[in-house]
Amino acid sequence: MSFLQPMFLAALPLIALPIIIHLINQRRYQTIRWAAMMFLLAANKMSRGYARLRQWLIMAFRMAAIAGLTFAVARPLAGGWLGLSAGGRPDTTIILLDRSPSMQETSGGAGGSKLETARQQLVQTLKTVGSARWVVIESATNTPHELESIDTLLNAPSAEPASASSDIPGMLQAAHDYIQANKTGRTEVWIASDLRENDWNSESGRWQTLRDAFLEFRQAVRFHLLAYPKPAPTNLEVRVTCVRRRQAGDEAELLVSLRLEREGGGDAKVSVPVQFEIQGARSVVTVEMAGPHYELKDHRIPLEKSHTHGWGKVSIPADANPADNAYWFAFDKPAPRHTLIVSDDPQTARALELSSTISPDPTLTCTAEVVPPDHLDSVDWADLGLILWQAPLPGERWTKELQGFVEGGGYLMFFPTRSAGEGEFLGTHWASWSDEKQDIPVENWRGDQDLLAHTQSGTALPVGQLQIHRYCKLAGEFTPLGSLRGGAPLLARVATNAGGVYFCTTTPALGDSTLASNGIVLYVLVQRALAAGAARRESTRQVVAGEVPSGEKPSQWIRLAADGTTGDPALQSGVYQSSGRLLAVNRAAAEDSAAVVADRKVAGVFRGLDFIRVDDQAGNFASLIQEIWRVFLVAMMTALVVEAALCLPHRTRAVVRAAS
């Protein structure tokens, strides 16, 4: 049990007041033994036990009345958050609201979504608890906004659903910065989330830093988690994996590949009608899904020859989560893919040239140019999609040129030279070559995303079959995508705002690795990087919600079709036009069938902090807490009535003697 006014519990020692009064009254009289009275005491001995019991009951009910009054004034609460307001009313309440697509999931009944339920529960609960200041940090922007009252959370635009993923550690960092900058006093942080791993990133090292930072505060900071971890087992998700326009003679067609996933797996066979919409023209294909996954590859949709670019949508019938029932796309004539290879090593340059010029599609034109490092003045950077750099790291002049190329959406991949040399790029540099006597196998790699991800059918790349004879050690700030035995990175990505920068710690040379002889991995990662980099030259672009491409201003986008009607275009799935370019905005791939963070991991990330968790479910609008002071008030009145009844004198019976 918890209390809204715990300070009044200091009056609980007054419960002993009846005992104190009883003891004082006893000391007011002295007992004098008188022989004549001893006979009367002996005669009354049979009724003494009942009299003493009656006196104890009177005292007990008097004490109960005082206790009931004290508890009633302290305003006790009943519900899931035990110890909810043990410290009294907070000075500041900060709400971290998860608006990610998975929070739009319902329980399958007539109730609202997880997000709607969380907002209702937060308003009901926090209105009861009270606060001097309300602040909300929503997941799309991670920016604190003060609320005039907690009721405004129900209709605030910043609390509406969004297509962007959440960054819970980033939201907590924003809360920490707000507390530190505003000297908020006693603070409570309320988190409403469905505990998806892609939003929480529970293995990140940021959690330890956050824990230490919050523990350094002098003022008390309490954390409350309102969790909605239960997924809907029947929910279906659709995602477009590839869109290509192909023209053969006078005929043109659009090839659309998609993937269906079922939440929680399941082997039951279901028929799913998939609707394709190309700028208003609709068609439906029914597929039979037997299992957790289904792939539809290169579904053909006829196009007019003049229809060179446009947009469309793939959708499935409404189910538990409307946020993953549609996927938007834009298409255009494929742009030529051009790669620049900077190298003085003919063997390495030849392997890279073959990987970048063999087109995965006959309709795509892939070309490559090999230049030594001292001939970069003649390069036309605007035509490039990918740069493969196997030379000493660039100096100041070419570093600025390459950074501009990456910021414009280009992709850059470094390979080591025979001598590591000096220099760095974006805080990362080569260290020294390894001197291993035996081949080094690849131990693990990221198969869920980026250049080494599984194929569209879910098949893993044969990265584990590679043998690395020599590799160059890497130093700086980077994210490993593949690691060798012992933990050294094989392929690493450096953080950028746009485009991509990668470091491969070995080369395709025969003396260094089997990247060339077992060329599948090299070909796939080069073609994936080339496709992503070439997209910057196309008039269409796939955009992940919440990630604004470099140079774009969402406020200037023109809405052509979207799931939402208001709000920031960069946060709502749909198709927008920007300076003649079509932008298709969709949820991140990690949102589909994301795992729920285990309970032990949730407890671990808040280890050492004042933390309370309550699990709820979508559509449950019953109040999580309620005041029960009336119960104690009724108990006090009942105790007073019983005490008064016990204090009433016994009615004496008249003794009538018969006349003699």
Image (cartoon, helix red, strand yellow):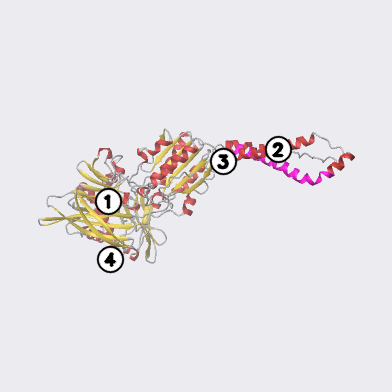
Q: Residue at coordinates 50% horizontally, 38% vertically from top-left?
A: 129
Q: Earlier in the sequence, mark 2 or mark 1?
A: 1
Q: Position of residue 64 (x, y in %)?
A: 65, 40
Task: Say which element carries label 3.
Answer: helix
Task: Say which element carries label 4.
Answer: loop
In the rendered image, residue 64 lying in the magenta stretch gets the answer: yes
Q: Earlier in the sequence, mark 3 or mark 2?
A: 3
Q: Can you tell which of label 2 and label 4 is closer to the viewer?
A: 2
Q: Position of residue 324 (x, y in %)?
A: 31, 51
Q: Position of residue 632 (x, y in %)?
A: 58, 40
Q: Are marks 4 and 3 in contact (CB under 8 Å)?
A: no
Residue that label 2 marks: 647
Q: Earlier in the sequence, mark 3 or mark 1?
A: 1
Neighbour tally class for label 3: few under 14, some 14-19, many 20 plus, Cα within 10 Å? few
Q: Is residue 270 left or right of residue 577?
A: right
Residue that label 4 marks: 517
Which residue type carries mark 2? Cys
Q: Can you tell which of label 2 and label 1 is closer to the viewer?
A: 2
Magenta segment's dominant SS is helix
Which residue type carries mark 3? Val
Residue that label 3 marks: 631
Look at the image and tell me whether residue 134 can be seen: yes
Q: Which residues are magenta?
A: 42-71
Residue that label 1 marks: 327
Which residue type carries mark 4? Ser
The quarter of the picture where the C terminus appears is top right
Q: Earlier in the sequence, mark 1 or mark 4?
A: 1
Q: Can you tell which of label 1 and label 4 is closer to the viewer?
A: 1
Please, is residue 258 above or below residue 46 in the view?
below
Q: Earlier in the sequence, mark 2 or mark 4?
A: 4
Which residue type carries mark 1? Tyr
Neighbour tally class for label 1: few under 14, some 14-19, many 20 plus, Cα within 10 Å? many
